[in-house]
Image (cartoon, helix red, strand yellow):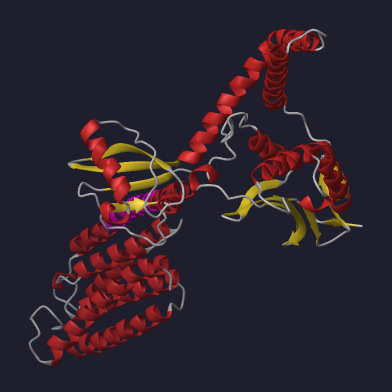
Amino acid sequence: MTSASNQRWKPLFIFNVYRLIIAVFFVGIVFINITPDFLGPFDGRLFLVTGWLYSSFAIFSIFTIQRRWPSFHLQITVQILVDIFAIIILMHASGGVRSGLGVLLVVAIAGGSLLSEGNTAGRTAFFFAAIASLSMLIQVALADIYYWSVYINYTYAGMLGISFFATAFLTHTLARRVRTSEDLAKQHGVNLRYMEQLNDQIVQNISSGIMVVDVLRRICLFNETASKLLGLKEQRNGQPLKSIAPKLAKQLTYWKQSGKLTSATFRPTNGNVDVIATFTELKQGNKANILIMLEDATLTTQRANQLKLASLGRLTASIAHEIRNPLGAISHAAQLLEEYPHISESNSRLTHIINKNSQRVNTIIENVLQLSRNKPPNISIFNLSVWLRDYINEFISQHSLSASSIILLNADDLLQVSFDQEQLYQVIDNLCDNGLRYSQGEPSLQLTIGIESKHPYLDIQDYGMGMTDKTKNQIFEPFFTTEPKGTGLGLYLAREICEANQTTLDLCSNNDKGCCFRISFPQLIKN
């Protein structure tokens, strides 16, 4: 049975236990012959038989309540009516209203009024009061007519009848208010549970890590994001912060001492990314827990870079013309000077330096301008293998390489991909230039076409010395470069172009035998 059903039937069960106790008490005192003078002196046999029947009915009622049959409303009606008639008979056997048993009728009416439910609860309560009053008046009238009792008192019976109606009214009013309060409390409970679930969903699914520690620095709560950022694989509620995240505990101590709300970037002991922590006190009475907000420093850096690039794009758009015009004049003058027939060798070397650096500055301007233009890709479907063969031949020719310098491995000659061909050329050219710069020996590069999880991919493998962990974590950041003459925008632009073409670019391997970059295309299309 549901909790709501138990709460509904339990009061009826308790009231029936009360009925059974009263009935057994009446039978017991008659059976052991210690009956008080005011119980059953008029007709002891009728009093005993009624008590036995009343006890049996109480036992039977317990059985029907346990079975939840018949209906709740029908059981209340039948049981209260039986209470009224049984008490009236017991009252008659005890000499009438003077016996004092009429008080039991008040209890029965009060119980029926409290237990009655629905829109008809008020009418049911007054119905019980009317039946009890009428039954008592009939009993008094019959006793008066047939002289069954010496004590005939209509006034006392009338006062009891008034008390029945007053009891019905008061108990019904009280029951209605109690039910209203109960319904309101239930609704508040539902709202609180909903808000609790909503808050739990927000806390667990928010992009920031959330952790709460108490004054003893024991973990009270943390969400899934915090667990991932700290590298925790199981719930650690109740454990000291220092034992599972010592670096975060150190940052917390520093915050307590310095009052600086935001920590420096640090990497948790078991974590894989750098983290920034923000600390806030949560005061509740005399307690002061600590709320710790954890942010992925990589995301923060990316947002900062995006703001930097957006500002840079607006800046370059406004001054590009002012820079390129004098730069073109410088380059043109250097070319004219270089063509001068009587130029000395030292001056020729200087003009060559001017031309080379002018070209480099122009390349930087072009790359930065490309960041601000956000040119939409012109995606087309083409055979990747055929396209790569043409590209490799052109790349070998441009760099004066041997045919064995670049190896192309095909898993599927008919494999087709969707990409902007001009932008793909820019991406692969950047990766191949980088790989050729660091590769040692023959072959210099290996390009592999394959399929993984129904998605085509292209791997570009070099044969260099690999990268350090610090370099590996920063290669896709804008303006990061290990080359003195590099711009630091090549790999960043390559990844941005891939994302614009719904493709991913990642470093899939890095060791002392070289690096491998993978371009994963979004869809497998065949002829």
Q: Is residue 182 above or below residue 343?
A: below
Residue 43 visible to the viewer: no
Quadrant of the rendered structure where residue 303 is?
top right
- Residue at image x 49%, y 44%? 470
Position in image of residue 15 (x %, y %): 28, 72
Q: Is residue 383 above or below residue 497?
A: below
Residue 480 visible to the viewer: yes
- Residue at image x 39%, y 53%? 186
Drawn side of residue 353 relative to residue 72, left or right: right
Quadrant location of the C terminus? bottom right
Drawn side of residue 462 relative to residue 146, left or right: right
Position in image of residue 291 (x %, y %): 32, 42
What residue range appears in magenta? 167-188
- Residue at image x 58%, y 40%? 475
Q: How many marks?
A: 0
Report the front residue among 524 and 79: 524
Position in image of residue 399 (x %, y %): 79, 39
Q: Is residue 175 magenta?
A: yes
Report the front residue among 129 and 460: 460
Quadrant location of the N terminus? bottom left
Report the front residue among 132 and 498: 498
Which is the main secondary structure of the residues drawn in magenta?
A: helix
Q: Is residue 135 magenta?
A: no
